[in-house]
Amino acid sequence: MENIVEILKSGGTILYPTDTIWGIGCDATNVEAINKIFDIKKREKNKSMIILVESEKRLQDLVDVPEMAWEIIDLSEKPVTIVYENPRGLPKELLAEDGSIGIRLVKNDFCKKLISKLNKPLVSTSANFSGDKSPLKFSDISPEIIDLVDYAVEEDREKVSKYSGSSVIKIWSDNRIKVLRE
């Protein structure tokens, strides 16, 4: 774990298991690392990426959380990413064109521990080239992607995700809701 945190702190990128699929991640406050992920994925820079947080406190440090978001987080059985308006302290490279950001409060122990030790939110984007199928297990990841990141986590390589992604729900500060992905 300490090795992974050092790689992230030095601007590195990792492959890691999340509460959904395998992801490519980096320190969500490091613009150079974020840009590396766009290059690795061959992803257009105008497509936003989501971030993961491990605690309610970190979520509240980044965004004003509408009451409706807490209800959805508490009631959702499937991992849920919520798109919030007006995030604080995050690079513009992560944000959608309207300035919003997708954030998931993870329940997965590995991710919680990693984010807590890094003490910063973690970028999470599927471990594939843009447009390709998302990897449900480590062996689904392209060898080329594995070669392009700085480190591939050993944890849970045999595990197959039961989710091909999280639900994505946009919530405005006035509690309007739009389901972007079920």
Image: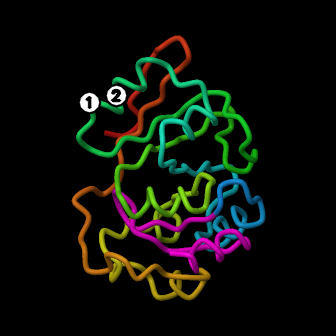
At a point 41% along the width and 39% down the height, the residue shown is: 168
Q: Distance between the residues labelled 1 and 2?
A: 5 Å
On screen, residue 5 versus residue 16, left or right, reads right
**Numbered mark located on residue 75 in the image:** 1
**In the figure, is residue 90 to the left or right of 172?**
right
SS of the residue under disc 1: helix
List x then y, in percent, for residue 92: 75, 45
- Residue 74 magenta-highlighted: no
**Span colored in magenta:** 1-26
Q: Which of 105 and 125 is in front in this view?
A: 105
The answer to which quarter of the image holds residue 11 is bottom right
Quadrant of residue 28 within the rendered picture: bottom right
Pointer 1 local density, CA inside 10 Å: few below 14, some 14–19, many at least 20 = few
Q: Provide the secondary structure element on which disc 2 rests.
A: helix
Identify the mark at residue 72; answer none if there is no mark: 2
Q: Which mark is residue 153?
A: none
Residue 166 lies, with reference to residue 163, above or below; the image says above
Residue 161 in the image: state x and y as whole percent.
Answer: 26, 64
Q: x, y percentage for residue 2?
A: 56, 76
Task: Name the amino acid, label 2.
Answer: Ile
Q: Among all residues in the image, which is located at the extreme top? A: 174
Residue at the (40%, 49%) spot, across then down = 106
